[in-house]
Amino acid sequence: MCGIVGYIGYNNTKEILLNGLEKLEYRGYDSAGIAMLDDNDINLFKVKGRIAALRQRVNDTAASTMGIGHTRWATHGAPSAENAHPHQSTSGRFVLVHNGVIENYQELKRDYLDGIAFGSETDTEVIVQLVDKNAEKYGDTAEAFRQTINLLKGSYAIGLIDKQDKETIYVAKNKSPLLVGLGDGFNVVTSDAMATLKETDQYLEIFDREVVLVNRNFVEVQKLDGTAVTRSPFTAQIDVSDTEKGTYPHFMLKEIDEQPFVMRRIIQEYQDEHDRLKLDQDIRSAMKTCDRVYIIAAGTSYHAGLAGKRLLEKMAGIPVEVHVASEFSYNTPLLSEKPLFVFISQSGETADSRSVLVKIKEMGHPALTITNVPGSTLSREADFTLHLHAGPEIAVASTKAYSAQIAVLAILAVDTARAKGFELDFDPLQELAIAANAMEVLTEQKETIEELVRDNLGTTRNAFFIGRGSDYFVCLEGALKLKEISYIQAEGFAGGELKHGTIALIEEGTPVIALATQENVNYAIRSNVQEVVARGANDIIFSMKGLERDTDAFVVPQVHELLAPLVSVVPMQLLAYYAALHRDCDVDKPRNLAKSVTVE
Ligand code: F6R
């Protein structure tokens, strides 16, 4: 994780770096720093904490026309000013920012840097000390940089400044994301185009194991042996207003509210001029010819994958396995003869998922990535991509990407079913439009949910979510949302499973949130509710219109039951939001987390 921004141009370096870092805070926010080069020296500012703290710390130094900045999510060494980036070489000549993990940093330290006094506990500092040492040896910074990069094992996105060279930011990348943004008389470096959109919408992709020399007037991409590479820029398709909160108090609330619009955008994007489903022919034939789908994902995306399994199996008749990415890489199950791997990832950068992708590509299997970021690593490295069209998701807790993932999986399931010649009593575009309207109704019921939170989750230390069938998957997601932003210990359970042990935790007043949107299990889940109520639980039932009972706490509008997760998740997201607000938690940036998890 971690976010990097760099600027070389004519003015305003400090603001461009700080504004960029603020936009990158979703990638990590436990410490931060910037380094700016002026006529005489490198001005370095580092703090433990957020960019707001860094802003206060940075004084108005002499006008600077180049600099690099970093916002950190700690991997090696606790969050502190010493461990914050940029790191400076002992001689003071070089400063460097890094996102990723250097796996061989201890060997490098032992083999090349004996006797050097390190100022931090990070793996990163090894890189800047090595560059300094190589600069003495080769007498040329570009060569020293390439030689250093050649020694690194692991993942990295790097920006380096040499005090003796006011014309270049040295950049390199492997596995971690990094782009160069192109301007008129200036250029930028960034982990995410969103952070520097105000400066430019023209970006140059950097491939793994490439080095880039970024000057204010030109950019030179090189392979590690120094040979030049030519590449055309692309236009970042992001609307600046999508990256702002507008009148909302939090990005999370804005993103919850955006879900109906996201559904409508998906309908538009996956519809041809005759109102029929539009999907890449190659994806269709990969889905049709595979004998089993393996869905690989993490966290919320894994929960969407569970809903996707049900859609694909019910409609397209394909057996589907859903795997937590971090488990699959190390404990690969027996595979079928013609597997198709489907990676679900909002960011498209999740390291756990990527390591599975690398592995299954080595095995020669096809891969489809469903992501919100089409140019992301998982998208580039898979054979096919389906785009979520959800717009940038900035709150750390994922909301609109989850519902977009389920909607796109529903479209994929129907398209595959039709390709296989199955007759379906389900028009996905029409059913999604109905779900979008239902979501809109739900987003207007915030006061009711806020009241439910006040009455039921106000001071509780734990909560359980129970459901059966696809309600169970939404319970897993509801519990994850609640715990990650409100810090209430919460668990999602299959309704029938609670009594096999966990029911021991039910005490007088323990909140048990039950979902009842599935007709075939409506009776069964209500029996499970009775079991916990008999032991003192405070039941809060969310049912679907048509299945409701008088004592239910909340009734969601009726939609096709295969799409029920799209609507039942909205009140779960709002529950988490208001619980976090009620407890004064930092809704958009919960503790210990980062939006894009690029370390395994
Ligand atoms: C929770 C959340 C995470 C992500 C997970 C995977 O709200 O956002 O659980 O879903 O880290 O991230 P992506 O989808 O980017 O691969």
Image (tube, rainbow, N blue to C red):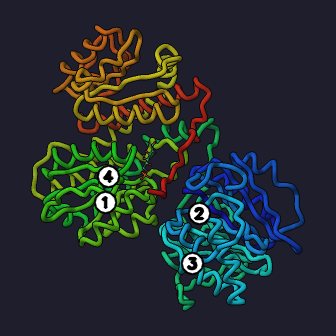
Residue annotated with mark 3: 149
Label 3 secondary element: helix
Q: Quadrant location of residue 122?
A: bottom right
Quick one: label 3, few (<14), some, or many (20+) residues within 10 Å? many
Decide if ligand 1 comes within 8 Å of the CB at mark 4. no
Residue 242 appears in view: no
- 570 or 5: nearer the eye? 5
CA gap between label 2 and label 3 equals 14 Å
Q: Quadrant location of residue 589?
A: top right
Label 4 secondary element: helix
CA gap between label 4 and label 1 equals 39 Å
Labelled pair 2, 3 in contact (Cβ < 8 Å):
no
Label 2 secondary element: loop
Quarter containing the C terminus: bottom left
Residue annotated with mark 4: 327
Residue annotated with mark 2: 123
Q: Is residue 306 left or right of residue 239?
A: left
